Image (tube, coloured by chain):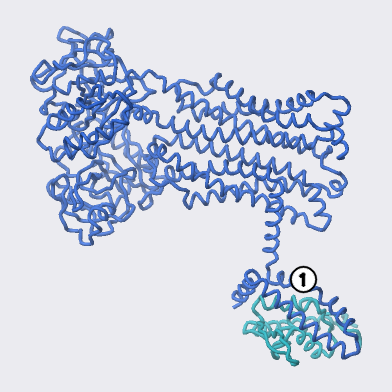
Amino acid sequence: MSLRAKLRSWWKGLAQRTRTESELESELNFHMEASAEDLMRHGMSREEALRRLRLELGSSVAHKENWRSAVGLRLWDDLHADLRYAARQLRRSPAFTVTVLVVLALGIGANAAMFSIVDATLLRWLPYSHPNELMSLATRDSKGTPAWKSFADIEVWQQRSQTLASLGYYNPIGVYLKSPAGDQFVSAPLVSSNIFSVLGVPPMMGRGFVADEQVPGRGKVVVLGETVWRNMFQGDPNIVGKQVSLNDVPHTVIGVMPPRFVFPADDTVPQIWVPIAITEKHHVRDFSTPPYQAIARVRNDRGRAAAAAELTTIQQGLAPLYQHLTGNGLAPSQVELTPYRDSLTKDSRGALIALLAAVVVIWLIACANVANLMLARGMARQREIAVRGALGASRWRVVRQLFTESLVLSVAGATAGLALAQIALHVFSRTLSTRLNLPEHLAPNLPVLGALLVLTVLSALLFGLLPAWLAARTPLEQSLRQGTAQAGASRNRHRLQKAIVAAEIGLSMVLLISCGLLLRTVFALRHVPLGFRTEHVLIVQPKLPRYKYRGQDINRAVYKPLLERVQQMNGVMSASLTTIVPLHKGFDPEITLYVGHGEKSTAPPTRIDAKLKAAGPELKDVLGFRMYQGRFFTDQDTADSRPVAVVNRAFARLFSPNGEIIDKFSVGLDKDRQATIVGVMDDFHQTAIDEPSVPEIDFCTNQMRPTDGFYQPVLQVHVELAIRTARDPEQLIPDLRRAMAGLNPDLKDSSFLTMNQVVEDAMGSQLLAAHLLELFAGAALLVALAGLYGLLTYLVTQRTQELGVRLALGAQRPDIVRMLLKQAFWLLVTGAAIGVTLAYVSGRLLAGFLYGVKPGDLWTLSAVTALLMLCGLLAAYVPSRRASRIDPLQALRES
Amino acid sequence: MGKPLELLQGTLDMLILKAVSLGPLHGYGVLLRIQQISGDQLEIQQGSLYPALYRLEHQGLIRSEWGESDNNRKAKFYQLTASGKRKLQAETANWNRMTQVMGSILDRKPEGA
């Protein structure tokens, strides 16, 4: 085989070089000896024979070279030599090398980190077959606000749709699963029986669900996730067919899903799946039916629009069926399809794309900067390159040499960047994962490394080829004749370099302005008067295996004793039960009230959509909000006293224009108990910092009974304990945990967080974007300043002679500084002008994130410009000052 | 005997293959064998011999091993491989056709002469 022969000779050339070369030498020696003997036999002297042979055969060095090019190792040898030469060159100018490496590491590092994040979110790998065909379905009413998805509608879509390949539905809930390892809270999405075939993933053991298992009473079956099977049942190979208990109800295991399968994909808790039982209630179109999420598989890319159109047509036919509930216009009448992957990141998508744009800008700045440095260096080395050309190096060979140098730099820079990215991801992983629901270990993976490789090669091309090409294009004898490259020939190039620096300054301006705007947004958000206290407030979310308390009033059995215990603890100033604290994301029920204004009124009934909450009398003291009118709940409001409720001002305004509501309005708790409004709270932000208050009605926890209509959505589903502490709330957590475990071991899974954390979380994408942009903009500023500094230093070196002459002719040193600073000043002004223009364009991208500040905010623009000018002039001052200290004699003598 | 002929471009490889096809030879032996067969009519540049040998070995057409020369000195001997043999046959056939065609073209007399 000829391939084997080739591989053998390459092996000999690379790995056994010494041995191979000594063999070549002895072969040559043998030839010489044998040939010389023959010549001597013809009467030639030995010396003469050897001399002739040496001429004919060539030296042994040439011989070895011949061998290497015969077996095709020449290219490799050249590369090797180029690499060694490049390394030597780079070692000889450490300042240049370090600058370039730092700049590249920052540029590539920011990109590697951001690509890792994007890969884990926007491009997220999903454990389904053809995940791009999966669509999440949502409905809207005729006004475009998100609406309900009832089972009855989903069923009709399933039956009538021609465009969908399949359609499934689910409702994520949690249960307590009993196993040999103990009770554990797991995620147990209720799913339609076809869900695994919609997702295109069959169970790895056993089977999936069948339609019959959705009939009530026949669905006591469960499919386990691989994690649950492995950790809780020790990977029992005979698990299928066994009984397990969910919330104390026995279920039969019918299958186990393959490793890494998760559904819904944003779940972080181990999962099992249970079929949804379709009861009578499901076929009713009203708001008491459980809400379902729908996921569908479309046939192809075009299927999405077609399916949305078809389902909307179907849904419009169904809208009249909601007439009895909503009156006009509020029935779900439009259907929207969003790629399932996008639906997982809908909150952070905009921020991610903006940040991705930001890192691309950083990369451009870094490349421009390095190109500039290389250009300057290329010019300084013109003489060397000319000499190489004169000695016979082809232009291509010179370009290749310079290109190798830039490749060495980018590979080294990329490696450093990768390390930097790894560190950044590690540092930010906690902040990032709470915002973006990222996988636990975020690290640059294969696609990211691939992208990085492409970036590296691209940057090498970008900043290596241009200077190389320019350098190789310069006529030989011109550069040889000139002592140093400083004459008019390079004026064009100076112009190019200045343009690059101005562009860099402009681009970093854009990032700085964006960062400034976001910082002002965060500042504005932080200073929105929230209307309640956030310092020294701790929130406890008790997590309880509810099935153990079925038929009991948890409020009385668990939460009341807990509250009393906590109130007596050291360091607790006050504590209160409540449904959900303001700004906290979670179960947040709303009710729609149709309000009559008494018998005598002629005004039509008002419709009020309001947040429904329950609160203890102490909540006002814990959160410190103020009453606008009337009173909050007190200890006198008990189960036996007159039922009362309070509303906020937003509610009162809707009720009557003058906001008079106390004692004028009551809500039925059950048939014969009417809760009267006794107070109006001042508005505070409940849902988001950048959104105004929404109407809210609160009932008193002490007055609510399990038989009340509002009890189920309010106290049954989600209760939190708000505590006002005397010192740092974090310090109270260990004591609290101990006290709670002592009181009721079932409370051991409860979680804690401070009100400040709740507020930070509510700032969500703005805070994330601001944090990362601070980092990015800082990096960009640094890189651009390094570019400015580098360019000026270089220009000063180039002009040493000229400056020497000026000094010798009587120029004052301050004049020199002023002259150079003026040059820098104009570069900065040009850059700033470019930056402001670009920022105006990019402001649109940001507009969605801004609060309390406009994209063209004058204050931010001037502050950023001032900062840039100041830093820029400082960077320029150092080389200018050095230039003014040139010794004219020495400068002239050097020429 | 006139001046030795200059070697045609690309024919050295063929000559080497032919030379070693008659039996293993060291580099100097190849040189001698070619001169001997050609009746000293061909002159081979000694400097171009070895690059050609290396190339042929790299292509897997010949292989080499160390052995002893006639006067008991260590020498590297080259011999034909199976694929070298095939190559030589193909090249020979090719050459024969080429000389025939070239000959008939060059022998052509002007029309009507």
The quarter of the image holding the N terminus of chain A is bottom right
| Residue A821 can be seen in this image | yes
Identified at 73% across, 32% down, the residue is A879
Q: Residue drawn at (76%, 77%), measured in percent from left and top?
A: B10
Q: Horizontal placement of A759 versus A802: left or right?
A: left
Residue A713 in the figure: left or right of residue A137: left
Which residue is tagged 1?
A: A61
Q: Chain of mark 1?
A: A
Q: Nearer the viewer, residue A287 or A796?
A: A796
Q: Colour of chain A?
A: blue
Residue B100 visible: no
Name the quadrant containing residue B25: bottom right
Chain for colour cyan:
B
Q: Position of residue B81 (x, y in %)?
A: 64, 84
| Residue A277, x across and y down, in percent | 17, 44
> Residue A813 or A763: which is nearer the viewer?
A813
Q: Secondary structure at mark 1?
A: helix
The 10 Å Cα crowd at callout 1, few under 14, some 14 to 19, many 20 or more, is few
- Give the position of the C terminus of chain A as an image quadrant: top right
